[in-house]
Image: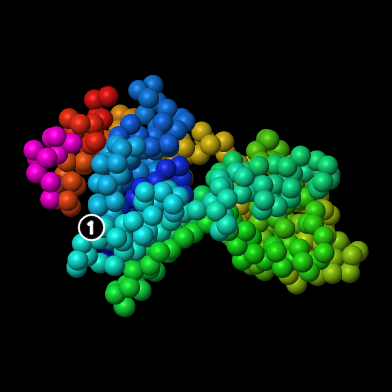
Amino acid sequence: MYNLLSNLSIVEVSSFVASPTAGLYCAQMGAEVIRVDHKAGGLDYDRYMLTKEGRSLSWENLNRAKKSVALDLRSGEGRELCVELAAKTGQCITNLPEKSFLSHAAIKAAQPEGAPDLTSVRIMGWHDGRQAMDFTVNAASGYPLMTGPEDWDMRTAPPVNQVLPAWDFITGAYCAFAMLAALRHRDATGEGSEVRVPLGDVAIGTTANAGLMAEMLYRGSDRERLGNAIWGAFGRDFRSKDGVRFMVAALTAKQWAGLVEAFGVALPISKLEVEVGVTFSDGDDPRFKHRHALFDIFQNVAGSHDYKALQSLMAAHGCTFEKYRTAHEAANDPVLIADNPMFGPSPANPSGFEYPAPRSFANIPAQEAGNPAPAPYLGQHSEEILAERLGLSSGAIGKLVDAGTVALSDKDR
């Protein structure tokens, strides 16, 4: 946690992954992010996996460092309070539909005189209004049909979906960036912005940024499946004598030279160069085109050594490599987690489960990052925020609580 955005407050009305991620990244940089949920919890409040107490570990981690307000968002009065809160705050992130009660126009119309011109960021499905989720968007991207063993046919073999909802996280990061860009514009001009970010188009646009779209149009056909090989460069998984699988990548001349030295394969590499008429130190192209012969050379050495010996050799020669871990192994790995300064203790989680949690991904050497802040309990800050932002008295808030319009902390649920 850093305090670079300590003068910024954002109302977040969201669920699932992309929208909460945008708020999370802003909160980790010091912004006050007020997440507004339905009083019984939003659509993602009970998202798997749950602890034995019924707390969602997904919700708990996507909502760290935020404040929570719980309203009856199915009632007119609860929705009015949500709109008023967003209007007086002046900044809003949401994935609710534009035609919902929380439209940009509705919030703007509720803004009091003198409030900063509204800046809103809205996550959509597709630009034309169609619904989308990460896993359906990924199906449209083309990647699942490029993933799988080399001998799988592009059209007849099944697709391989990715497990990580990567497009959600990319969209969330882009929305945090879009919010700050819009605020910079408002600081310069006084003009707010309505920014719409379609999840599906972020995915397709990202493939275009990666050069994939241009490649498909240029070559006039689909890319073949490569198994675990890296497209256009030298890299693949190998297996050591003691059965450890590890990934190696060599995209630069230095990485390639180090790998050749670490594996002691200069002689067979030279023989192969003479045989095929290329020089592998010339770049990615010859290494990729002759990857199968190169893979055989490296696997022959890998299969003759235990991983510990290979690890020492690769580290000594500055190679880029990493062994494969299960997710459980990664979560318990001292190098990745326990001895990593990016992680800190997180003892006050709503789940009651204490475990290491990430600080901000960005590192500011001149400043010490604070420990990860826990997620709030649902409705934990309802009274505080409604009093501070909307000027409601404790008596007025009490009546809203009695009427079921406002919910306070669910700590003792």
Q: Does residue 308 sit above or below 5 in this rendering?
A: above
Q: Helix, strand or loop at disc 1?
A: helix
Extreme residue toward the top, this view: 52
Q: List x then y, in percent, for residue 298.
A: 75, 51
Which image quadrant for residue 324?
top right
Using a 10 Å C-alpha cutoff, classify the residue at mark 1 as few (fewer than 14 neighbours), some (14 to 19) or many (20 or more): many
Q: Is residue 85 magenta?
A: no
Q: Residue at x 42, y 36 (%)?
A: 43
Task: Say which residue label 1 marks.
Answer: 88
Which image quadrant for residue 4?
bottom left
* Count of marks placed on residues: 1
Does the rendering let one see residue 210? no
Query: 337 or 106, which is in the foreground?
Result: 106
Query: 36 or 233, which is in the foreground?
Result: 36
What residue range appears in magenta?
Answer: 391-400
Q: Residue at x 14, y 34 (%)?
A: 399
Q: Is residue 397 magenta?
A: yes
Q: Residue at x 69, y 47 (%)?
A: 144
Extreme residue toward the bottom, this view: 189
Q: List x then y, in percent, for residue 341.
A: 36, 50
Left or right: where does residue 368 sit relative to residue 177?
Answer: left
Query: 6 or 198, which is in the foreground?
Result: 198
